[in-house]
Image (cartoon, rainbow, N blue to C red):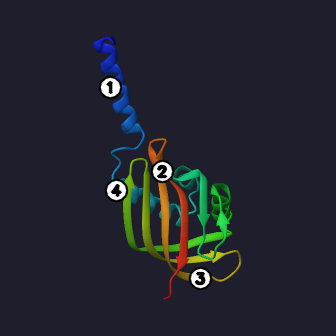
Amino acid sequence: MIPVILRMGLLNYAIALLFISGYGQTRDDLLKAEKMRFKAMEEKDSLSLKNVLADELVYIHSNGLKDGKQSFISSIASGQLQYQMIEIELLDAHSEGNFGWISGRIRLRVKVGTADPVNLHISYLDIYRFQKNQWRMVAWQSARLPD
């Protein structure tokens, strides 16, 4: 027979694990992470990007090119990829346990290398996982929309 104090300790531990693992995270928290990520991309804020992007990130650009966390952050930090403007049109966020996903539409102005900036209108789906006490993006895929 497990003593009552030990059982209470195990119950408290289980409740703490549920809280820490992301249960109870709100849709608003997920949307805040998404908006912060867009702002960090515009401002070339590598530190914020390191925090909001998961180590195993798979980032598929609207042109089909693929990046991981390090290559994506490096291209922004070096100025090779410049997000000059990101305007949100639609964000539809959902979460279930430790995972969240957002489908959205944005307009953005991007400059790649020495090319002239390009205005894009894209639709996207990204996936977040709650880990280390915050939402971190694990996947992004986007497609260009007609203007």
For the residues labelled 2 and 1, the Cα–Cα distance comes to 25 Å
Count neighbours of disc 1 (C-alpha within 10 A) and say few if under 14, some if 14 to 19, many if 20 or more. few
Q: Secondary structure at mark 3?
A: strand
Q: Secondary structure at mark 1?
A: helix
x%, y% of residue 132? 49, 41
| Residue that numbered label 2 is attached to | 129
The label on residue 100 is: none
Closest to the camera, between mark 2 and mark 1, is 1
Residues at badges 3 and 2 in contact (C-beta under 8 Å)?
no
Which tag, 4 or 2, sits closer to the chain's start? 4
For the residues labelled 3 and 4, the Cα–Cα distance comes to 32 Å
The label on residue 11 is: 1
Amino acid type at circle 1 is Leu
Closest to the camera, between mark 3 and mark 2, is 2
Quarter placement of the N terminus: top left
Q: How many marks?
A: 4
Closest to the camera, between mark 1 and mark 3, is 1
Amino acid type at circle 3 is Val
